[in-house]
């Protein structure tokens, strides 16, 4: 940690699994937040973990689609428990600026495969909306939190570009007055079809991407640019395919072949307006 800090990197703990939304495993998210907080409380200033990010992806399990609405409610309940723990640990020494992030697919914004669901922390606060919007509500007043929308396209503009796929999240966050950040996640491994990854477009295209982002992101104060997720090879839910298609090409288009857990490093110098670091992951 000290070495990474000396080189200008911020290190985030990253974890998650599709079964973390099961009632028997729902404790894992809050436990990870507590572990990070306890570590930071005892760590030197140059050895702090700067954040924790969750990449849970319950739709990797084909059973997710047997009852999508129930699965989404379980997912949101899991996230709420994590957010509650995160708010609690911010009072611990060394954690006042701890960041919290959630990676979600772009199609959690209310498409037919993941329709709006009724959810609320209490019966009195229940509303019906897309899962992505419920998550933004949870993070609305948390400036150190962010939503990483995995919108895998190697082009920004047009009806199938990344901006088109994250437009509704930006619009909702703006309307809700959210102070949390939004990161546009990107793919950089060799996957098919080619439009899903910057492997085919090159690093120069990826680095120039934030400068070409249209108004929907540029005008939102918490826009944090693009980040490469450097995901592993994947396969679609409900199939035995191993063709390398990433999990976020669209509904039913992605299943990770293995979980990505561990520490993620990002350059401190490239923070976005709300403190989220909009840069490429270092494998």
Image (cartoon, grey):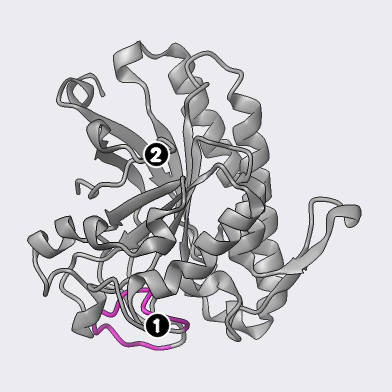
Across and down, in percent, residue 222 comes to 46, 46
Within 10 Å of the Cα at label 1, are there few (<14), some (14-19), or many (20+) other Cα atoms? some
The span shown in magenta is: 239-251
Does residue 23 appear in this view? no
Please name the residue shown 40% across and 35% down the image.
Answer: 275
Please name the residue shown 17% across and 22% down the image.
Answer: 3
Of residue 132 and residue 37, the one placed in the foreground of this image is 132
Q: Report the disc number at residue 72.
A: none
Residue 190 is drawn in which quadrant? bottom left
Across and down, in percent, residue 174 comes to 57, 55
Within 10 Å of the Cα at label 2, are there few (<14), some (14-19), or many (20+) other Cα atoms? some
Rendered view: 118 above or below 101: below
Number of marks drawn: 2
Rendered view: 54 above or below 159: above
Q: Nearer the viewer, mark 1 or mark 2?
A: 2
Q: Classify the position of the N terminus by image quarter.
A: top left
**Chain-order first, disc 1 or disc 2:** 1
Determine contact: label 1, label 2, CB under 8 Å: no
Q: CA distance from mark 1 to mark 2?
A: 32 Å
Q: Residue furthest right?
A: 124
Please name the residue shown 56% across and 30% down the image.
Answer: 34
Q: Confirm whether the magenta stretch covers residue 263.
A: no
The secondary structure type at the circle numbered 2 is loop
Which residue is disc 1 drawn over?
Answer: 253
The secondary structure type at the circle numbered 1 is loop
Rendered view: 82 above or below 258: above
Which residue is disc 2 drawn over?
Answer: 273
38 left or right, relative to 49: right
């Amino acid at each position: 940690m000290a070495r990474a800090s000396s080189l200008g990197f911020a290190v985030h703990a990253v974890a998650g699994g599709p079964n973390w939304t099961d009632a028997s495993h729902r404790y894992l998210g809050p436990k990870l937040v507590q572990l990070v907080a306890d570590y930071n409380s005892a760590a030197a200033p140059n050895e702090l973990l700067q954040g924790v990010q969750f990449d849970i992806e319950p739709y990797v399990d084909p059973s997710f689609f047997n009852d999508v609405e129930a699965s989404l409610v379980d997912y949101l309940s899991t996230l709420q428990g994590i957010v509650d723990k995160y708010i609690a640990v911010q009072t611990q020494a060394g954690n006042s600026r701890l960041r919290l992030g959630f990676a979600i697919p772009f199609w959690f914004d209310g498409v037919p495969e993941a329709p709006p669901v009724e959810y609320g922390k209490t019966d009195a606060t229940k509303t019906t909306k897309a899962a992505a919007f419920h998550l933004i509500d949870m993070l609305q007043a948390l400036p150190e939190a962010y939503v990483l929308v995995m919108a895998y396209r190697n082009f920004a503009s047009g009806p199938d570009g990344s901006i088109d796929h994250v437009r509704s999240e930006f619009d909702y966050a703006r309307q809700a007055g959210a102070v949390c950040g939004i990161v546009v996640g990107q793919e950089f491994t060799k996957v098919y079809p080619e439009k899903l990854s910057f492997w085919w477009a090159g690093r120069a295209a990826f680095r120039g991407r934030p400068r070409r982002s249209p108004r929907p992101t540029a005008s939102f104060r918490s826009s944090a640019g693009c980040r490469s997720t450097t995901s592993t090879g994947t396969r679609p839910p409900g199939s035995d395919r191993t063709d390398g298609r990433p999990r976020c090409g669209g509904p039913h288009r992605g299943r990770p072949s293995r979980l990505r857990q561990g520490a993620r490093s990002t350059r401190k110098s490239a923070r976005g307006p709300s403190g989220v670091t909009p840069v490429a992951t270092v494998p």
